[in-house]
Amino acid sequence: MVECCCTKETRIKIVMGYSAVSTLLHLSAAVVFGVKYQLYTIAMWAAIGGLYSLSVASLHGLAIRNQVRPNPNSMVIQLLPAILLAAILGMIFSLGVTVYGLAKAISGKEDLDLSSHYILSVWGFLCLKWTFYLFQQTRHYSRSFHPDSEDAAPFVIQEVLPTEEEVS
């Protein structure tokens, strides 16, 4: 295995920078496709990809600030199952849009221009990339709270009962 010269925190900062730049590019592409070309479906998928890349950057930002830690009362920990569900649904819909766009473009023998379904499938694939990465990172942070149990669902938040000292 090759040793990396970067620390874990440096790698997280690199990913945060990459996803922040990607967020800006996605949202600016959404504005261009929506305002200049009036291609609202493509603009919508560009904006959705930007929101998913923003959520990846936010999740890593919380990890850098050490707010993703094994504290069951933490709001971030309680939001991880919702983030996971959003990532799974996003993967399903993005894969569907990618396949639909390619099938429609190939069956219609469309040229490669701005109004073709090829562009829609590209933005669907970019959304698929970000949703997969969000899913992967959410699972990583959730499993870090339950390292012993591989069979147990990593997203079950157990209620912490007060100790006898806290009750008194």
Image (cartoon, rainbow, N blue to C red):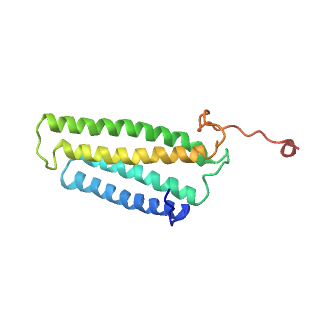
Question: Is residue 116 found left or right of 144 in the rendered image?
Answer: left
Question: Is residue 102 found left or right of 90 in the rendered image?
Answer: left
Image coordinates of residue 93 in percent, x first then y, are: 35, 36
Residue most extreme to the bottom: 5
Residue at image point 64% right, 37% down: 149
User: Measured along the vertical axis of the image, is residue 148 above or below residue 49?
Assistant: above
User: Measured along the vertical axis of the image, is residue 107 above or below residue 114?
Assistant: above
User: Measured along the vertical axis of the image, is residue 38 above or below residue 89?
Assistant: below
Image coordinates of residue 60 in percent, x first then y, are: 51, 56
| Image-quadrant location for residue 23 | bottom left
Question: Is residue 93 found left or right of 43 in the rendered image?
Answer: right
| Image-quadrant location for residue 24 | bottom left
Residue at image point 52% right, 40% down: 82
Residue at image point 61% right, 33% down: 151
Q: Is residue 41 visible to us here?
A: no
Question: Is residue 104 found left or right of 76 in the rendered image?
Answer: left
Front in this rendered view, residue 168 or 127: 127
Residue most extreme to the front: 1
